[in-house]
């Protein structure tokens, strides 16, 4: 069935799982900094031999850290 020219195509949904390099790059930090300061507090998901982190867990940790910083 052919699609109409004006049919709206839904955008791809955001990914759920990211590598440490992807998360670090998005935060503007190195992968080593991620390993030292964030990784110990967030449990990864193992997919075979590949480790990925749930973006919602990262966001939750960041929100918690933001709220716990003294003014």
Image (tube, rainbow, N blue to C red):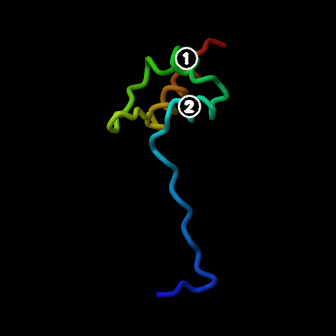
Residue 31, position in %: x, y? 57, 24
Between the residue at mark 1 and the residue at mark 2, the CA separation in whole angstroms equals 26 Å
- Count of marks, rendered view: 2
Which is nearer the eye, 45 or 10? 45
Residue shown at 49% from the left, 26% from the top: 61
Q: In this view, does 3 lie above or below 41?
A: below
Q: Which quarter of the picture shows residue 23?
A: top right
Residue hosting label 2: 21
Residue shown at 40% from the left, 32% from the top: 51
Q: Is mark 1 on a helix, strand or loop?
A: helix
Q: Which quarter of the picture shows residue 33?
A: top right
Q: In this view, does 13 lie above or below 31?
A: below
CA neighbours of label 2 inside 10 A, class few (<14), some (14 to 19), many (20+): some
Q: Earlier in the sequence, mark 1 or mark 2?
A: 2
Residue hosting label 1: 68
Report the mark closest to the observer, 1 or 2: 2
CA neighbours of label 1 inside 10 A, class few (<14), some (14 to 19), many (20+): few
Q: Which quarter of the picture shows residue 34?
A: top right
Quadrant into which the C terminus falls: top right
Residue 13, position in %: x, y? 51, 56
> In the rendered structure, are the residues bearing label 1 and label 2 in contact, judged by CB atoms less than 8 Å apart?
no
Residue shown at 64% from the left, 24% from the top: 29
Residue 66, position in %: x, y? 59, 23
What residue occupies the far top of the structure in this picture? 70
Which is nearer the eye, 32 or 14? 32
Residue 68, position in %: x, y? 55, 17
Q: What element carries label 2?
A: helix
- Side of 71 relative to 55 (left or right): right
- In the picture, the disc for residue 24 is none
């Amino acid at each position: 069935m052919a699609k109409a020219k004006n049919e709206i195509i839904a955008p791809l949904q955001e990914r759920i799982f990211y590598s440490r390099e992807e998360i670090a790059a998005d935060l503007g930090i190195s992968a080593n900094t991620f390993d030292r300061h964030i990784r110990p507090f967030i449990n990864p998901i193992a997919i075979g031999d590949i480790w990925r982190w749930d973006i919602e867990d990262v966001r939750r940790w960041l929100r918690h850290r933001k709220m716990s910083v003294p003014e």
